[in-house]
Amino acid sequence: MTVIQSATKRMPPPEWALAQRNLIRTMNEAAPIFQARYTRADGSFIWRQEWPGFDGSDDGYESYHNWPLFYALGGAEDVYSRSRFLWEAVTQQFTGYGQLWREYDAHYDWMHHGESSLYFYYFGLCEAANPIDIGRTRRFASLYDGSDPLAPNYDAERKQMRSPITGSRGPRTVNEWDDWETHRAILANYPAPFSDIPGVSRGANGEWPIADWNDDRVYGDILRLLNERQMSGDVPLNLTATSLLTHAFALTGDEKYRRWVIDYLEAWSERIVRNDGLCPDNIGSNGVIGETLGGNWWGGYYGWQWPHGFMTILQPLLIAAMNASLLTGDLTYLDIPRSQLDKIVSLGREENGRWLVPHRHTDDGWTAYRPLAPEFPLQLAYFSHDKRDFDRLQQFPERTGAWRDILPGRGKGDDIHIAPWHCYLQGDTPDYPSRILAAQWEEVAQRMEKMRHDDTDPETWDVHHWQEINPVHTEALIQLTLGGPQVIYHGGLLHVPLRYFDADARRPGLPPDVGALVSAVTGDSLTVTLTNLSPLHQRRLILQAGAFGEHEWTTVQAGDTTHLVGKRHFTTELHPGASLTLRLGMRRFVHAPGYTQPW
């Protein structure tokens, strides 16, 4: 591969590069210790013998889901090997519990399928031609493209799913008593799914009721109403399945997967048009909006009313539109989630200098007014690089204050720092790289401390126990080295303008000793500084345009020298102790996406 630029200028290593490599080294050491503490020799969790219901396998996968992603960023080969072993172990253990069948969740919704699938998707970033992965991907995709007779989840004629609860055993249109057994205590803290549950009253001021799922009588009525009103037909959450089919296309190049993603998203776009421009949250088995909910476009499973509201409408639309744009190069698909974002912002109101938007629509109308999470508009803006999406951010006064804060911790999705990262790229927080790397190192340290003092009984552990101690974090590395935001946690794919490969080791990720910092990103360019911390060894790395090679480098500028490229890849050599700043010109979405590696 042509060497576009060779870095020979030696300079003392910058603070951010030392912190970046220290974070990678610390997580390389922490992952095996975490595995040794919480698993048996066969990789299964040291835990209870039984776990009923259909909830939980997603949490098992989530405990290690980012380990292969960490490897693809530059983590140790050993961590990747462990991630493959542990995926198999989780699959076997939760098959024994009853959640999985044919290596896939027998029944669950796509919020949870999306969370657990991240682990599997990341394998594609690590290996492009693993026959086991390709076979599994085709099998898993067949559960949703209508080709598996044992799992008729998809109605190809109407281009819709047959239930919000799907999986390897097909659509589940009737919830049984044990299905939610382990989730009842959690759901008891959420607003009730319906306002007319027998014996469940509103608050003193007419507030939406809270239903006690732990009460068997109430729980029985909730199950009955769920089965009558929510279990037949399609919901927006199912759009997250487009990531599975997009992953299948990237791995196989099979056109039928691309066609399915486009057909399904366009079917939802037509439903939005039929509902006067607002996304309905329930489509009956006959394709009718509000078919089982008295004609109401709200009230569906994980919809506008229950339990989270707007998040579970916009996120699937955003995920699906990103996937469709990736597959086709047509960014007009982003108008689908963009229209919903603009609609909800237009329904907002100002209170005490903040713009509050409604997050739920119930039988009482729009409610749950609060600030819009920055993740929504920023994910859209950094995918589209459309001026309209950046201009929208001006509507949020808090962006100049609270958005700059680096909150402690990492959040379940390791995604709570998108706003301060955006502020860094805008030139508002120049010390962000050092601060976020220090914060993520501190989070690793705290989690390892928690693990060392974890002398509780495994029989009492909740299924989230391990993911809350997992010491591997990737948000800072994705932002700083790849120039993009963290993956949307409920089932998104990695959408970044840049990836690296170690040219000598022929593996993905940054080579040893190399730090990278993206300091500017636009729709047609980015600026990255590369530094080799080793005073002893030369490092060679390949830079790829886009996570899936979907973009193309047009030019590479270093100092006063500009090279014409016209390819997806180029190689840079970093002499011992050398650093180099590159300004890269690019054309976006000009190649079919794939996992194929440069060699």
Image (tube, grey):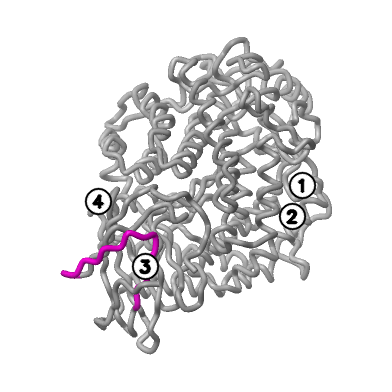
Badges 3 and 2: C-beta atoms under 8 Å apart? Answer: no
The amino acid beneath tag 4 is Gln
Tell me the distance, in whole angstroms, between the alpha carbons under discs 4 and 2: 43 Å
SS category of the residue bearing label 3:
strand
The amino acid beneath tag 3 is Phe
Tell me the distance, in whole angstroms, between the alpha carbons under discs 3 and 1: 43 Å
Which of the pair 594/238 is nearer the observer?
594
Q: Which residues are magenta?
A: 559-573
SS category of the residue bearing label 4:
loop
Badges 1 and 2: C-beta atoms under 8 Å apart? Answer: yes
Badges 4 and 3: C-beta atoms under 8 Å apart? Answer: no
For disc 4, the marked residue is 426
The amino acid beneath tag 1 is Leu
For disc 3, the marked residue is 570
Q: Earlier in the sequence, mark 1 or mark 2?
A: 2
Q: Which mark is residue 297?
A: none
The amino acid beneath tag 2 is Thr
Tell me the distance, in whole angstroms, between the alpha carbons under discs 3 and 2: 38 Å
Which image quadrant for residue 390?
top left
